[in-house]
Image (cartoon, rainbow, N blue to C red):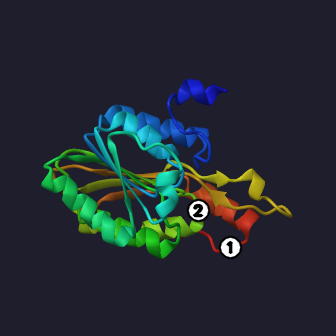
Amino acid sequence: MYETLLFPSVLHENWQMMPWERIGMTGVLSRLHAKGALEIGTFYGGSLSLISQFAESVISIDVDPEVNQRFNCPANVNIWIGDSADLVPKALAHFNELKMPLNFILLDADHSAAAVTRDLNLILDYKPREPLILLMHDSGNSECRRGILAADWASNPHMHVLECDFVPGQIIEHSIKDGRGEIWGGLALAYFLPEPRTGLPRITQSAASSLRCLNHLMLNIPPIS
């Protein structure tokens, strides 16, 4: 019931984010007043229906051609179907050709470490015209976290701060079996500015110890380094 009050005009069904992640993303978007926004991973359009309320122009990328049949696309959104390896560079070039600042990116697509790193390195080729915030969903998941940490953050002189636990991940209750579960969710946040930084970017993991303990106790998988 409360979703209608907190997230009006948002597609709640099949939106793969917890309430605190949704609130975190809403807060970021409401402060940014984004001109251009890019989403990588559309699925059922939950996050997209929120992003479209705060950004002037949105490109959403997904590999599944059936995405267009799942919901009514907002007027300020263009959905591009194809591999993010091809379409992310094209989307960044598209915003540059329009001379439109890209202020917001959500990465929530292929969750393998290799794919996360690949997509992030493509994004890191972008030089921002205005402040840009990049959110990465499922940053609490061990595989996604490895992909995030493996990206070449220092290669972009305009990337100033990466907080891997802007919103921490958690064990998903319905995944628990025999006392073991999986950690999903969480939002990592990277902050870009037109002005280049001095020195290396600041990279923090404010919930790393908590996630390391959860991985050890519940999942019996190697801890996040």
Q: Residue at x 50, y 70 (%)?
A: 146
Label 1 sits on a secondary structure element that is loop
- Amino acid bearing label 1: Ile
Q: In the depicted view, which residue is nearer to us: 154 or 9?
A: 9
**In which image quadrant can residue 141 be found?**
bottom right
From the viewer's perspective, is residue 96 above or below residue 88?
A: above
Q: Residue at x 67, y 27 (%)?
A: 1
Q: Residue at x 51, y 65 (%)?
A: 145
Left or right of 86, for residue 211 = right
Left or right of 216, for residue 179 = right
Query: Which of marks 1 and 2 precedes in the sequence?
Result: 2
Which residue lies under the disc numbered 2? 141
The label on residue 221 is 1
x, y percent for residue 23? 51, 35
x, y percent for residue 44? 54, 50
The answer to the question of whether label 2 and label 1 lie on touching residues, with beta carbons closer than 8 A, is no
Label 2 sits on a secondary structure element that is loop
From the viewer's perspective, is residue 179 above or below residue 50?
A: below
Q: In the depicted view, which residue is nearer to us: 23 or 15?
A: 15
**In which image quadrant can residue 209 be found?**
bottom right
Q: In the depicted view, which residue is nearer to us: 68 or 23?
A: 68
Left or right of 78, for residue 174 = right
Residue 196 showing in the rendered view: no
The Cα–Cα distance between marks 2 and 1, rounded to whole angstroms, is: 11 Å
The residue furthest right is: 178
Q: Residue at x 48, y 39 (%)?
A: 24
